[in-house]
Amino acid sequence: PLAPTAQLVADARAEGLGLGAFNVIAIEHAEAIVAGAETAGAPVILQISENAVKFHHGKLAPIALATAAIAKDATVPVALHLDHVESESLWRQAPALGFGSVMVDASKLPYDENVAATAHAVEYLRSHGLYVESELGKVGGKEGEEPLGAHAPGARTDPGEALSYVEATGVDALAVAVGSSHAMTSRDAALDHELIARIAAAVPVPLVLHGSSGVPDGELARAVTAGMVKINIGTALNIAFTGAVRDYLDAEPAAVDPRKYVKAGREAMAATVAHFLGVLRDPA
Ligand code: G3H
Ligand code: ZN
């Protein structure tokens, strides 16, 4: 069934477990993520990013409504999250389309402008009962940016500034820069666990790890133990999907029915989801 993001995050935090939040690009991602979560017996978040909306010709409703329908039919609790939103016209659509939460991404802006833009979104979204995440410290590797190498120093979130930011914006959850980077296709990011623990101790809200595809299993488990709650995973699903489709088409060069190779890709994504959820729910 559909569940509020606030509830799933609160439950995971209380239990000391990680909550997997996986990116939906096409309907098959939503089907695969729910299948993987059902295999793992775990609640899950389906998230649609502004970049995915751009892929769907700027339309949120078709993919959001399909994703919501898949969530409602699931045997595990599933929340809907609108991810990395920079455009106000997009976050304003979230309440009517069944989203339980939005990540308002003003992290490109200078601190004061980030605070103002985020607080403005919080006011509207909160009044519609939504849960709001935002980012301080700029996790690199987003589309259109220079990719950060796995061991590049990158940006880091300052614990004191994180507390001021949470108080000034009123956000419910905070995405922090602690060593991960978006869109990594290798799993060798090293996280700053000491910084995660210091930020978790400094701020009252749950922390969110972005760019988790590039983080090895052991590092993810340690991050959850140190206080990370929502763990965002996107690229790993696309690696699994594309690898399986490529293998299928290499083996069957005469294939033309997309149901055949997309099914292979969907099954590979579901297995990847189940694997990550196992790691996040057994952090010790
Ligand atoms: O918000 C989405 C995530 O941060 C996904 O990042 O594609 O590097 O796993 P990733
Ligand atoms: Zn992200």
Image (cartoon, rainbow, N blue to C red):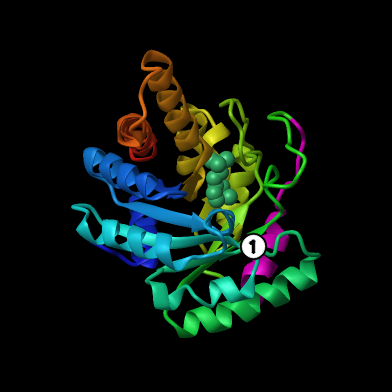
Q: How many residues crowd mark 1 within 10 Å: few (<14), some (14–19), many (20+)?
A: many
Q: In the rendered picture of this protein, how many numbered marks are placed on residues?
A: 1
Residue 73 position, x and y percent, is: 20, 57
Q: Where's ligand 1: which quadrant?
A: top right
Residue receiving disc 1: 105
Q: Is residue 107 above or below residue 191?
A: below
Residue 134 position, x and y percent, is: 60, 63
Residue 21 position, x and y percent, is: 43, 50
Please indicate, yes or no, whether residue 209 appears anywhere in the rendered image.
no
Q: Where, by quadrant of the figure, is residue 149 drawn?
A: top right
Q: Amino acid at mark 1?
A: Asp
Residue 219 position, x and y percent, is: 52, 31
Q: Residue at x 40, y 25 (%)?
A: 244
Q: Residue at x 35, y 24 (%)?
A: 255
* Quarter of the rendering occupied by the C terminus: top left
Q: Which residues are magenta?
A: 152-169
Q: Is residue 121 above or below residue 11?
A: below
Magenta region includes residue 43: no
